[in-house]
Image (cartoon, rainbow, N blue to C red):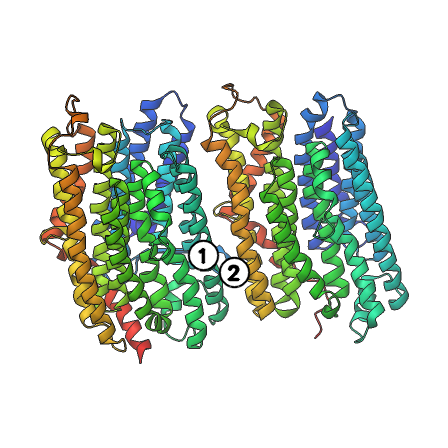
């Protein structure tokens, strides 16, 4: 049933080609990405959901609703549609986070996520209403004209910031990240993968559209904000991740840090070639999606036996399940940005956007990225250290049996990681995507 | 032979990788088959390398040969651009020789926890990274190969290493990661500052491609310097090396000493100096200073060591100091000496680590206090140690001499524009370094090789050199002698290319 559902979703891609709103290359790239990501997520969920005593049909139903929200998001170029899309993405995930309903932590995850989500939606809607009130339109094209009119005043700046805060929550940027670690840890792991990849990318798409298509002409209003949350996300995410004892929680903090890398091009975009920065974020999101899904798939596979995602329980995995260990190692080092795994190209384009801007603030941010890359290696490397260098704990020498669907998911993401790493031209193809019409003003 | 030239380098780079894939595909229980496959692929790579030597036009050593230039990542103008000249050829061949020798040595010397499959696969991946780095002519491609080397080494030390392996492997990784992050930033800076934007090393070397102020150039050079100097390693960035060497398995130490360290010095000769000759001029006295500090500091540290492997590791710091001093003179003779030094150090120190590994296997310790009388107990092994020590301390007639002596000579008259006084004082210090080198190497030989057999080992039978060891070592020994007697083989190959670089420097020095 699941593959059919997925294929049906795959079919909608073509149907929506002529659909409402803008269907440009940007929208298509992300639609494709969301479909593939959800396909892999569903592969990861199949055995997890079937093994536990969970409702299956509703699970996939909700997940697909959320995917529909992402589809809409990548095409929408208007405030209300963006808001509706964001809520369509979010509301099903509030439920999904609490799917393990006999587990207190899962319920906590769900409630926490819901409360923070509702609050941030309210803040965002408040901001949007100001934007509408000031610009007189909900169409992004009209808003960009308003933003380019010179002085938009304190209220205008406030309106833009409030709107962006909503998205900062969605992508779990510091300081709007407090929900993420608890939710990621408590939610069923496939849902965590979904939240940290698809749902996060959904938030980023909204952010990209808003910033580049609407707010671009007035960078003074948001550039500092972006700089600060980018630097804070990277630093806080990485430093806190160092101290985690649970792999899923560590991945949660690492995904906060990764969001920071993706925000970097926003912060430097007005000073350099806009196209470079615009593409850098997109390329990074695509690559991040592939490798992070892979990492989660491996963790799910391993946790099937160890029954926990505690780092210690990964000891000596290399001796019992070498293939799985090599796979997880590859994904983690890809996240750390080691060539020839895909992640290096993401880092590379981020550095390129920073150096293209070339002014002092951009360079400072670049140094922050560099230092953080080294910090990040510590905790990614730590997991690998435990898996490779330690002896198995319980002396259980049987290899972990990985179900076919999960194996397929790992294989797909692994191929993606290697191929993209060796031939970055494939994702770099988004260079054909020109940024949306409005250009940056002073 | 035109067809061969088109694909020779690509084959050379990726054949080991294919080998690694094949090794991974063989089930773990088929140990013999795994070893044969790994050896087969590495020997095939060596055969291709010999083919490359045969095809290489030695009269035009200064020109890039067998060039391959295909679009790779068109967005950022990065190309799949390979090619070799007289400078890269010897190092490329050295890498292709060392790996099969290590595999032969591994035949029945697998360090715990055994697992030949993973061990050999990592070794082959390493080979791809090393050969790729020496053949790359595109900065991005160079960076990728440079980094590919990291992971296999990290795991080699971490899984198969000694008691402190976790600490050593992570230290190794973090140091090099940090350096390469700064190096990457410098590469990107070069890209954005050049007009038109390019990562092509050859284009960047032409004057006018990179029209930037001296101050900016110095800053960019600093980034590259960090990346390469950590890899060399130069004082004061060398602290990862003794740990990595001491903890690594024998094969890991050999590869590390023989080839990996050369990636850093090669980076200076191939990238940093020709692309930023002006900045190289400004930096040269400082590089020279760090180099001689490295020579003396490494030598003094050697004298304080009680562990044989650690001593050899510090001797690497000293030897690489000579190489860097040669480079810092920015003269024809100095850079030629540096490249000779790289190859000679690769052969000799690789050999020393092999012997240390074999000693460790027989005595289960490298603590020099507990060793002694090796020449009495295992005469062949003992004399080999003696021979290699002589080569290492720069005895004329053996390879080590031609790396050290011309480097010191070059410091007598450095390139125009560099202070003669400063470099002459470097020369004096370096000369003192050679005396110290003789002291610590002879001291090691005396404590390990000579004297009486300690009571602890009196009743043990210590096996002399075994067949697999002979097979792995004889090629190294032969090359040490041949290069020592006829240095022109190597000098003649590198000279044309080096003169090209010196011309670039001279043009910028005015």
Tell us which disc is closer to us: 2 or 1.
1
Q: Quadrant of residue B65?
A: bottom left
Q: Secondary structure at mark 1?
A: helix
Is residue A425 visible to the viewer in this orientation of the structure?
no
Which mark is first along the chain, 1 or 2?
A: 2
Task: Pinpoint the chain carrying mark 2.
Answer: B
| Furthest residue toward bottom | B510
Which residue corresponds to mark 2?
B76
Which residue corresponds to mark 1?
B140
- Front-most of residues B213 and B360: B360
Residue B19 is situated, as x and y percent measured from the top left of the image, at 36, 35
Task: Pinpoint the chain carrying mark 1.
Answer: B
Q: Quadrant of the C terminus of chain B?
A: bottom left
Does A86 sit above or below residue B196? Answer: above
Judged left or right of residue B103, residue A165 is: right
Mark-to-mark CA distance, 2 and 1: 10 Å
Label total for image: 2
Residue B218 is situated, as x and y percent measured from the top left of the image, at 41, 71
Does A392 sit above or below residue B226? Answer: above
Residue A216 is situated, as x and y percent measured from the top left of the image, at 73, 66
Residue B396 is situated, as x and y percent measured from the top left of the image, at 9, 54
Judged left or right of residue B114, residue A319 is: right
């Amino acid at each position: 049933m699941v593959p059919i559902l997925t294929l049906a979703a795959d079919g909608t891609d073509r149907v929506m080609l002529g659909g409402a709103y803008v269907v440009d290359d940007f929208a298509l790239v992300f639609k494709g990405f969301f479909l593939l990501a959800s396909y892999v997520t569903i592969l990861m969920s199949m055995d997890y959901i079937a093994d536990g005593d969970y409702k299956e049909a509703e699970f996939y139903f909700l997940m697909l609703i959320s995917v529909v929200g992402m589809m809409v998001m990548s095409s929408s170029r208007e405030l209300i549609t963006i808001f509706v899309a964001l809520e369509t993405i979010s509301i099903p995930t509030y439920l999904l986070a609490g799917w393990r309903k006999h587990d207190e932590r899962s319920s906590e995850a769900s409630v926490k996520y819901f409360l923070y989500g509702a609050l941030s939606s309210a803040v965002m809607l408040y901001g949007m209403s100001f934007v509408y009130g000031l610009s007189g339109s909900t169409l992004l094209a009209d808003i960009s004209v308003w933003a380019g009119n010179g002085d938009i005043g304190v209220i205008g700046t406030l309106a833009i910031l409030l709107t962006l805060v909503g998205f900062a929550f969605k992508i779990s940027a510091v300081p709007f990240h407090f929900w993420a670690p608890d939710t990621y840890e408590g939610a069923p792991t496939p849902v965590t993968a979904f939240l940290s990849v698809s749902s996060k990318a959904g938030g980023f798409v909204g952010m990209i559209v808003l910033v580049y298509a609407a707010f671009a002409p007035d960078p003074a209003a948001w550039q500092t904000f972006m700089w600060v949350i980018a630097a804070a996300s990277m630093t806080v995410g990485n430093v806190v991740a160092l101290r985690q004892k649970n792999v899923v929680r560590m991945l949660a903090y690492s995904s906060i840090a990764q969001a920071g890398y993706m925000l970097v091009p926003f912060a430097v975009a007005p000073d350099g070639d806009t196209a470079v920065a615009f593409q850098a974020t997109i390329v990074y999101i695509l690559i991040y999606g592939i490798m992070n899904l892979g990492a989660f798939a491996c963790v799910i596979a391993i946790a099937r036996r160890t029954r926990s995602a505690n780092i210690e329980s990964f000891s000596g995995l290399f001796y019992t399940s070498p293939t799985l260990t090599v796979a997880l190692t590859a994904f983690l080092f890809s996240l750390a940005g080691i060539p020839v795994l895909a992640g290096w190209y993401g880092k590379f384009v981020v550095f390129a956007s920073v150096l293209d801007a070339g002014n002092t603030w951009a360079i400072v941010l670049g140094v922050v990225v560099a230092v953080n890359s080294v910090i990040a290696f510590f905790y990614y490397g730590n997991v690998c250290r435990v898996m490779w260098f330690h002896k198995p704990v319980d002396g259980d020498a049987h290899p972990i049996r990985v179900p076919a669907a999960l194996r397929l998911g790992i294989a797909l993401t692994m191929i993606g990681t290697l191929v993209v790493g060796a031939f970055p031209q494939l994702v770099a193809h988004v260079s054909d995507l020109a940024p949306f019409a409005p250009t940056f003003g002073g | 032979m035109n067809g061969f030239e088109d694909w020779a380098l690509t084959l050379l780079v990726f054949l080991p990788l294919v080998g690694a894939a094949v090794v991974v595909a063989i089930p773990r229980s088929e140990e013999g088959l795994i070893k044969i496959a790994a050896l087969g692929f590495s020997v095939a790579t060596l055969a291709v390398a010999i083919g490359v030597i045969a095809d290489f036009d030695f009269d035009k050593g200064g020109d890039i040969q067998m060039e391959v230039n295909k679009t790779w990542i068109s967005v950022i103008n990065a190309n799949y651009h390979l090619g070799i000249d007289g400078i890269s050829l010897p190092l490329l061949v050295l890498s292709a020789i060392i790996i099969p020798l290590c595999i032969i040595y591994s035949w029945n010397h697998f360090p715990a926890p055994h697992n030949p499959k993973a061990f050999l696969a990592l070794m082959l991946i390493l080979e791809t990274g090393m050969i790729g780095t020496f053949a790359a002519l595109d900065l991005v491609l160079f960076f990728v190969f440079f980094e590919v080397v990291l992971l296999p080494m990290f795991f080699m030390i971490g899984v198969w290493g000694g008691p402190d392996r976790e600490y050593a492997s992570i230290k190794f990784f973090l140091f090099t990661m940090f350096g390469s992050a700064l190096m990457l930033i410098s590469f990107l800076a070069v890209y954005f500052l050049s007009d038109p934007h390019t990562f092509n090393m050859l284009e960047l070397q032409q004057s006018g491609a990179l029209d930037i102020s001296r101050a900016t150039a110095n800053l960019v050079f600093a980034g590259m310097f960090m990346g390469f100097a950590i890899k060399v390693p130069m004082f004061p960035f060398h602290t990862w090396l003794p740990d990595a060497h001491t903890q690594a398995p024998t094969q890991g130490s050999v590869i590390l000493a023989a080839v990996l360290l050369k990636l850093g010095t090669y980076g200076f000769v191939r990238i940093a100096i020709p692309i930023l000759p002006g900045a190289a001029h400004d930096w040269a006295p400082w590089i020279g200073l760090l180099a001689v500090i490295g020579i003396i500091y490494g030598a003094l540290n050697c004298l304080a060591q009680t562990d044989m492997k650690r001593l050899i590791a510090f001797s690497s710091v000293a030897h690489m100091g000579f190489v860097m001093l040669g480079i810092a003179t920015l003269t024809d003779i100095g850079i030629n000496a540096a490249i000779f030094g790289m190859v000679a150090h690769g052969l000799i120190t690789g050999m020393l680590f092999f012997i240390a590994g074999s000693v460790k296997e027989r005595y289960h310790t490298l603590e020099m206090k507990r060793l002694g009388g090796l020449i009495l107990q295992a005469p062949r092994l003992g004399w080999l140690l003696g021979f290699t020590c002589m080569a290492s301390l720069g005895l004329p007639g053996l390879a080590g001499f031609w790396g050290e002596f011309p480097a010191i000579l070059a410091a007598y008259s450095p390139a125009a524009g560099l202070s003669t006084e400063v470099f002459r004082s470097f020369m004096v210090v370096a000369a003192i370094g050679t005396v110290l080198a003789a002291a610590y190497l002879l001291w090691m030989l005396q404590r390990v090789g000579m004297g009486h057999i300690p009571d602890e080992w009196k009743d043990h039978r210590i096996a002399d050199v075994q067949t697999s060891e002979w097979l792995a070592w004889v090629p190294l020994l032969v090359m040490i002698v041949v290069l020592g007697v006829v240095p022109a083989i190597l000098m003649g190959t590198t000279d044309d290319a080096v003169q090209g670089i010196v011309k670039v420097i001279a043009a910028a020095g005015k």
